[in-house]
Amino acid sequence: MQPEIIPLHPLFAAEVRGVDAGAPLTEPVAASLREAIDRYAVLVLRGQKLDDEHQIAFTRYFGEPEINIGIYRPASQRRLARPEMADVSNVTPQDTVQARDDKRRMFNLGNMLWHTDSSFRKPSGCLSFLYAHAVPSRGGETEFADLRAAYEALDDETKATIEGLRAEHSILHSRATLGFTEFSEGERAALPPVLQPLVRRHPGSGRKSLYLASHASHIVGWPVPEGRLLLRDLIEFATRREFVYVHRWRVGDLVIWDNRCTLHRGRPYPPEERRDLRRVTTIDPENLAQPAAA
Ligand code: OGA
Ligand code: MN
């Protein structure tokens, strides 16, 4: 049986019913999910029962999972065994809720800035698969913005200005904007900045899209303040409420998004409550990222 696709927003995002992500997919079902991702960019599958192995196996129908940067988490301190899993939770390896000043928590607070996953890596992030094991009693939503619709809504002068521009992306930059700079020399060396196009054509839909993230610090060839202002203006424009779908999590939700044409951010929740979300992200086969000149 083919899945049922129910739009959740006038511009993008849809709920998919009739798919068990923990079981093998038939090729027609996998193909219809790929088509739905290309069209809607955000898909919500409710009521799933996945362990980490299932989540990784499901992701492989759509691409090659990246190995998580695992910052601050040498193998012995990782809560999750598989290197493909990004631990988006506020839970320690001892299964307690992280202290307010836990480094891993402060690092993950950067997810509350509008961003795309792994735009600072080469190859960059493509599709993300985020699954909810535990959710807080209130807050903790994830918001998504449609960067194809935002691009199309720009005025012609802005479209002409930004065509062909490139931005420098680094995860150190997004964390620094929140005042978090505790990176060792080794971590800095392991995360060199990359250059990304500001406008790209989304392969699956043929539509042009902005490519933005809080990881982007400036525009190549422009004075830093001017480029940073442009990036801020574009993020402000692209995240106007009409471009945003808000996902309110329930345990068992699997949300898939296309990082090539959306922005997302987490929202606050009571810090003493447990929130256990785990993500697998595929690498972008187009690999547009270029090393930034040193
Ligand atoms: C992520 C992310 C936001 C959230 O998993 O990549 O940014 O709401 N998550 O936890
Ligand atoms: Mn993210």
Image: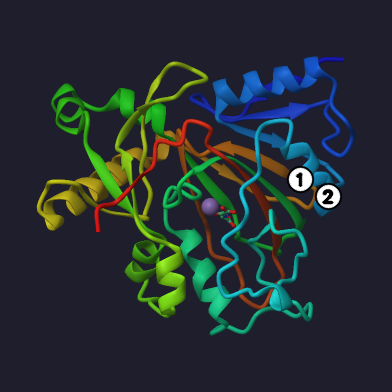
Q: Position of residue 256 (x, y in %)?
A: 64, 38
Task: Report the residue at 53% width, 27% height from top.
Answer: 12
Mark 1 lies on residue: 56
- Classify residue 56 by image quadrant: top right
> Judging from the image, what secondary structure is the residue with disc 1 in?
helix
| Residue type for callout 1 | Ile
Mark 2 lies on residue: 53
Neighbor class of circle 1 (other Cα within 10 Å; few <14, some 14-19, many 20+) is: many
- Classify residue 9 by image quadrant: top right
Q: How far, Cα to Cα, is label 2 from label 1? A: 5 Å
**Front-most of residues 177 and 66:** 66
**Front-most of residues 81 and 106:** 81
Q: Position of residue 36 (x, y in %)?
A: 63, 21
Q: Would residue 141 be found to the left or right of residue 214 on screen?
A: right
- The correct choice, above or below, for 200 with respect to 236 in the image is above
Neighbor class of circle 2 (other Cα within 10 Å; few <14, some 14-19, many 20+) is: few
Mark drawn on residue 177: none
- The correct choice, above or below, for 252 with respect to 242 in the image is below
Q: Verify CB contact (< 8 Å) between mark 2 and mark 1.
A: yes
Quadrant position of the C terminus in the picture: bottom left
